[in-house]
Amino acid sequence: MAFTKKTVRDIDVKGKKVLMRVDFNVPLKDGVVTDDTRVRAAIPTIQYLKEQGAAIILMSHLGRPKGDGPEPELSLKPAADKLAELTGYDVKFVPDTYGDEAAAACAAIKPGEIVVLENVRFLKAEKKNDPEVAKKLASYGDIFVLDAFGTAHRAQGSVVGPAAYLPAVAGFLLEKEVDTLTSIFAEPERPFVAIVGGSKVSSKIGVLDHLIDSADTLIIGGGMAYTFFLAKGYTVGTSLKEEDWVERAGEMLKKAEAKGVKILLPVDNVVAPEFKDEPGTVVDSDKIPDDMMGMDIGPKTEELYAEAIKGAKTVFWNGPTGVFEFENFQHGTKAVAEAVAEVKAAGGTSIIGGGDSVAAINKFGLADKMSWISTGGGASMELVEGKALPGVEALLDA
Ligand code: ADP
Ligand code: MG
């Protein structure tokens, strides 16, 4: 539908060496993968390629290496081990990326075999999309596959580089992510309710702006709500606020009104004297005391939001509606998550993007009740802002 690039389905991979950029940027603790979501997400494409008789060379970054050489605690070996564990496949880890050992392993690889190269970011030039990096990596394979949705918004050597030298196509994860996240702008089933929270308006301007073009209702929560309050002439006490963005927030409210998009802002809030995990007090939005800050949406707002969400056929959610990391201020975000979780059960579609929103849903154990949870924080936001992703742009047109 919305995906206009070639995928692994459109190219003959049998007997070919497939160089694939995946997103194995997983959290580690003491050398063990603590959340294998991203490794799991890459398996359908790996499985397909293996069944088609391709030799598979996988590469990824992990963490933020300095780029001056190997850093053992940021090795991709634990991710390679996890892939072997989850699939039962033999997975060969090679502790090299750009040197002779990697080249030899890629030269020797046979159809059906899987090699995982070391962290691509152990070399500084990778992040700059240096043509030498791209050429080197491309020399390992016959076909380039991009399945690393989480880094598809970065024009880096291992993400876009090989596409200049090899036929380049998308993997299934990349295709599904782009398709799903752009579908909310193409032809969403209506009503389409978007929920945007998080800390700052400034970091979500593009997201809010683009969502107003498509949504029927836009629910605003979290820290950014207070800048909208200022635009409406309320006082917000010591709540998070961005004075420089008040005017822009006001313009956005006007744009929504002109387009007939309903905006929902909190009607009550849980406030506290300090940014601390201690019980708060509920106050209406026009009565926030001067010495208090808004930490969560209040019970009336929870009900208002849940009602709007329940009537939706499509829901997109990005950004917690309160400081959900604190036990005392997670209630509102949980109420929103529970309402969103009912949408899929009722035959609608719920799409979640953004790192902290996903963390919140996992914390509440509601992940399997959502239609789609994006594996890419930054990349998902750029798509929702309506931007093209460099990694996707570099692929062959369908
Ligand atoms: P995402 O990663 O889902 O895009 P953001 O990074 O934009 O979300 O925002 C998440 C952060 O917003 C969380 O750390 C949360 O504590 C914070 N936040 C939510 N509500 C408030 C609030 N009322 N005051 C301050 N911070 C808030
Ligand atoms: Mg975040």
Image (spheres, grey):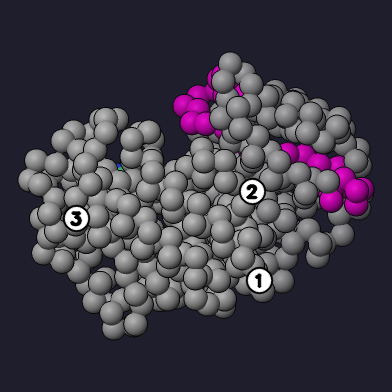
SS label for mark 3: strand
Label for residue 197?
Answer: none
User: Real-space Cα distance between discs 1 and 3?
Assistant: 48 Å
Q: Position of residue 358 (x, y in %)?
A: 51, 45
Q: Amino acid at mark 3?
A: Asp
Judging depth in this view, the residue of 69 and 218 nearest the camera is 218
Name the residue located 29 percent from the left edge and 83 percent from the top edge.
Answer: 258
Q: Is residue 177 above or below residue 159?
A: below
Q: Quadrant of the C terminus?
A: bottom right
Judge the density around disc 3: few (<14), some (14-19), many (≥20) Cα neighbours within 10 Å: some
150 left or right of 331 in image: right
Can the viewer see residue 105 in this picture?
no
Q: Which residue is mark 3?
A: 284
Q: Which residue is mark 1?
A: 4
- Residue 68 lies in the magenta stretch: yes
Q: Position of residue 173 (x, y in %)?
A: 68, 53
Can the viewer see residue 293 in this picture?
yes
Precedes in sequence: disc 1 or disc 2: 1
192 left or right of 264 in image: right
Precedes in sequence: disc 2 or disc 3: 3
Q: Which residue is mark 2?
A: 368
Judging depth in this view, the residue of 275 and 376 nearest the camera is 275
Name the residue located 27 percent from the left edge and 30 percent from the top edge.
Answer: 278
Name the residue located 57 percent from the left edge and 41 percent from the top edge.
Answer: 365
- Residue 183 lies in the magenta stretch: no
Precedes in sequence: disc 1 or disc 3: 1
Name the residue located 51 percent from the left edge and 70 percent from the top edge.
Answer: 312
Q: Position of residue 364 (x, y in %)?
A: 52, 41
Q: Which residues are magenta?
A: 48-75
Q: Amino acid at mark 2?
A: Asp
